[in-house]
Image (spheres, rainbow, N blue to C red):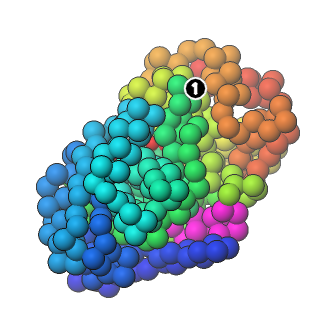
Amino acid sequence: MKKTKTLEIYLKDKKYKIFLGNELIDKIDIILNCHLKNRKVVILYDKILKKQLNVLKFSLSKITSKLVTIEINSGEKSKSLSNYIKICEKVIKTSINRESVVLAFGGGVIGDLAGFVSSTLLRGINFIQIPTTLLSQVDSSIGGKTGINSAYGKNLIGTFHQPVAVLSDVNLLHTLNKREVLSGYAEIVKHSIIKDKIFFEWLEKNGSYIINGDNDLRIEAIFNSCKIKKSIVQEDEFEKGNRALLNLGHTFGHAIEGYLNYDGTVLHGEAVSVGIIMAFKLSIKKGYCSETDLQRVTKHFNKVGLPTSIKYLTNKITNPLKLWKIMQNDKKMQNDHLKFILPECIGKSKVFTEIKKSEVLTLLNEELKT
Ligand code: NAD
């Protein structure tokens, strides 16, 4: 069995480790002993993970007798204000104290929700991320963004609350369906396009094996992806500047999801994958980037099965102006300008704030014309 890989995130006044490897939930009693021994541990878990929960509970029972589990329904709807309140009350009812620890066992939905719950309970208690989707292992479990959705948009209610540790067990990924794997893979490619051309080249060679379930290559890909996110988050924990780079493809991606009222028919990573291609197209229009790089990324997406156009995703998106309006409501508006993260080439992206409405509308019209 391969050794566990670790990566440490250093922030201004805290640091924490990401543990990455095989069968880690079986050994949580050893790996995270210092955070969990004899403490009350409240596991908030995705309903779909009932079987895996038993393994986790067995391991934890070796170091604490104060174990509580709270089941959460799968899906984005669980990130609601009403559900947040319900879960807080359930956790409080178990008589937690400031030493208690919340454990998020699930994908990004559970991580965001459990993170927000733990950041507000008793003015903030410790929490640990055990991400169970590829997307959450490479992205949402690290960096400390927590949140739930408002009637006005996604993730509009939230905090920055870093976990005390992240335990990413690649064995958990084998029950994910292919679409969910691809959705997470899109975020891995995104990280390479932002900052690391050599990693992108490695993904061109290994992408299909990663998607098809090779554990060792998955560990390598998740590790490199987390390294990129780590370097950006360490520089700008509270997204005052360059952390926005992580939103490459997201201004278009969120607009696509928003247009469909986040009904789940398009997965986040699928929307981001189309968003990345659109970001390349906008960048080419502005003269920042070459056509060759767009062709290379498109070829890779086609090869692994990621979508490259809105029309390929859905036929429900037809109105460019409506898409534009949704973009304007996104958090990335700054002083009336839309902030776009655009690639200058594979491996280097930048934040641009001077993009005109007409330029974006031209692109949206081209994208949606029949
Ligand atoms: P998710 O948590 O909804 O998981 C996707 C699906 O996979 C769900 O149906 C879930 O039940 C299922 N699932 C989870 N683990 C599984 C497993 N091991 N085997 C089989 N099925 C499993 O979604 P996600 O894609 O992990 O994350 C998306 C969420 O993350 C969104 O709410 C998004 O806003 C958020 N997000 C947050 C950040 C951040 O920095 N905090 C970053 C990116 C995305």
Which element is circle 1 on? loop
Three-letter code, disc 1: Tyr
Nearest to the observer: residue 355 or residue 281: 355
The spot of residue 342 in percent (x, y) is 72, 47
Q: Position of residue 35 (x, y in %)?
A: 38, 76
Determine if the magenta segment contains residue 231: yes
Q: Is residue 2 above or below residue 362?
A: below
Q: Residue at x 68, y 16 (%)?
A: 321
Of 15 and 68, the residue lying toward us? 68
Does residue 352 appear anywhere in the picture?
A: yes
| Foreground pick, 59 / 6 | 59
Image quarter of the N terminus: bottom left
Residue 203 x/y as whole percent: 47, 63
Residue appearing at x 73%, y 23% in the figure:
361
Q: Which residues are magenta?
A: 225-237
Q: Is residue 68 magenta?
A: no
The residue located at (38%, 46%) in the rendering is: 88
Q: Main secondary structure of the magenta part?
A: helix
Residue ID for mark 1: 152
Task: Specify whether 288 is left or right of 139.
Answer: right
